[in-house]
Image (cartoon, rainbow, N blue to C red):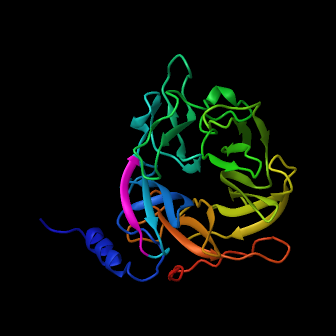
Amino acid sequence: MKKTSLTIALACLAVLGAKAQNPIITSIFTADPAPIVHKGTVYLYTGHDTASVTATNYKMPDWHVFSSKDMVHWKDHGALLSPHTFSWATGDAYAAQCIERDGKFYWFVSTFHKNDANSKGGAAIGVAVSDGPTGPFKDAIGKALIVNEMTTDMKHGWDDIDPTVFIDDDGQAYLFWGNGSCKWVKLKKNMTELDGPISVFKPKNYIEGPWVYKRKGLYYLVYASAGTKPEMIEYCTATSPTGPWTYQGIIQKNVPNSFTTHPGILDFKGKSYFFYHNGALPTGGSYRRSICVDEMFYNPDGTIKEIVQTTTGVKLVK
């Protein structure tokens, strides 16, 4: 059986993977990075693009997990979750994020809901749970945490996507999400129930893909933006996770060969890193994306310096 040019190209890139490079994952097409650090290892939760080269829409069958101890060598743990895990779900595996609390790992995902007694369809957010960062994961509550009918400010059916979860120093957890507007709600300590009403706001140029975190007393809301077409990454800051949020500007301009981009941010071994996706792999594109990571730097006042996108990636972290 003849190897395709894509197979050969990806194999060559995999061999080169011993050296730092971007994209960091070359064996499959990946998108929507969500990294965490657990016991000295980075775990990267990703989407998976399988659309054909000529496709005009997404095909994302599952979510994958990769891990690394040095930010250069990445182990593929495989497809550990899919919409099929959720009896109420249908459709593709949109952006997701996993977070650890009290020894359990909660993977918040966005997909679409079946037309049934609980929802008439549209995008929805579910949560899976596991005792470890690589599973096995199961549906934590047997139903969607957020359904389309719970938010009515946007009239399209795909506004409830792209969850990001943040646990503040006082133990309060917050869920942010949304396409077209940014929505947030408090979560109970069990991470599977809402703890209050849903709030909605619209940061400047906001489209989707929020990422929320705290650094040195300052809260950051980073998101894919409509500053230009294709998307860029812009951000706001606040002194409270509930706002008000102050717009700070662009931190990442357009990426190669992809209409979308998506942020994921973490600190690891004394440095800050910015994960994103582009369409730079052979035969890649807006529906065949690939995850990259570059180092991230802050100004003395806490504002973020513009991300310098590289093809060489980050140096080996020891």
Residue 271 to residue 160: above or below = below
The segment highlighted magenta reads 73-80
* Residue 150, position as x, y percentages in the image: 68, 28
* Residue 189, position as x, y percentages in the image: 67, 37
Residue 265 to residue 188: above or below = below
Q: Nearer the viewer, residue 21 or 315?
A: 315
Q: Nearer the viewer, residue 40 or 36?
A: 40
Q: Residue at x 64, y 61 (%)?
A: 231
The quadrant holding residue 155 is top right
Q: Nearer the viewer, residue 129 or 112?
A: 129
Badge count:
0
> Is residue 97 left or right of 149 when viewed as pictured?
left
Q: Residue furthest left?
A: 1
* Residue 24, position as x, y percentages in the image: 46, 71
Q: Residue at x 53, y 83 (%)?
A: 315
- The quadrant the N terminus occupies is bottom left
